[in-house]
Amino acid sequence: MTTTKITQPPALSRTKAIAFTIVGALVVNVVIWLIGLVAGGSFEFAQDGKVNSAAPGGVIMLTIVPALIGMTVAALLVPYWSSVIRVAQVIGPVLALGTIYLTIDAAFDGVSTIALAAMHVVLAIAIFVGLESMQRGRTA
């Protein structure tokens, strides 16, 4: 008989949870961007007659800023509203996944669209796990 052990997120302080979430998501998203480049993605889209690039600056900014704002708000509110982390664990991933349509609507090439959508999924997972680590750190 084989037993499977499920690994739980570690208990982290609020600041460490934010930092590890952002760094972890950023590293994975940059790797996805690099894979997308190798696979032929341009990460460019046309808007108002101009060609704009979503990477690497956009990848970096759109990974760091939403996670930093959302997780910081949750971290600041948790001393006053103990359930805020559970609420944020729903709102954060829903926003990350819900904004995938912006990538599709921007008319990127197929490889870029898939890579950028995958980055949204990575951010959703990272936020959920990071907030869980923050919750565990709060109750540890």
Image (cartoon, grey):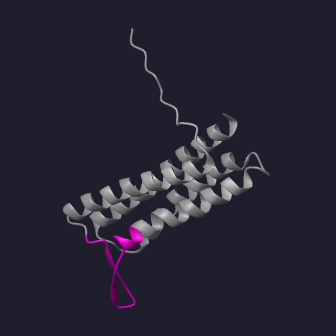
Residue 44 among those drawn in magenta: yes
Q: In the picture shown, does residue 138 fall above or below 39?
A: above
Q: Position of residue 69 (x, y in %)?
A: 60, 64
Q: Which residue in the rendered view is the most extreme toward the bottom?
A: 49
Q: Pinpoint residue 57: horizontal percent, then vertical percent.
A: 38, 72
Residue 20: x percent and y percent?
A: 49, 50
State the quadrant of the N terminus: top left
- Count of number-bearing discs: 0
Residue 35 lies in quadrant: bottom left
Q: Which residue is rendered at x = 34% and y = 65% of the image? A: 113
Q: Could you say which quadrant of the image residue 109 lies in?
A: bottom left
The stretch in magenta equals 42-59
Q: Is residue 124 visible?
A: no
Which of 62/20 is in front? 20
Residue farthest right in this picture:
80
Can residue 41 be seen here? The reply is yes
Q: Would you say 136 lies left or right of 19 here?
A: right
Q: Is residue 47 left or right of residue 71?
A: left
Q: Residue at x 52, y 59 (%)?
A: 96
**Residue 116 magenta-drawn?**
no
Would you say 23 lies left or right of 92 here?
left
Quarter of the image where one finds residue 73 = bottom right
Query: Looking at the picture, does residue 20 appear above or below residue 33?
Result: above
Question: Residue 39, percent across and down?
Answer: 20, 61
Look at the picture and state if 20 lies above or below 5. below
Q: Residue at x 67, y 55 (%)?
A: 74
Kindly identify the residue that appears in the image at 43 percent across and 51 percent down.
Answer: 24
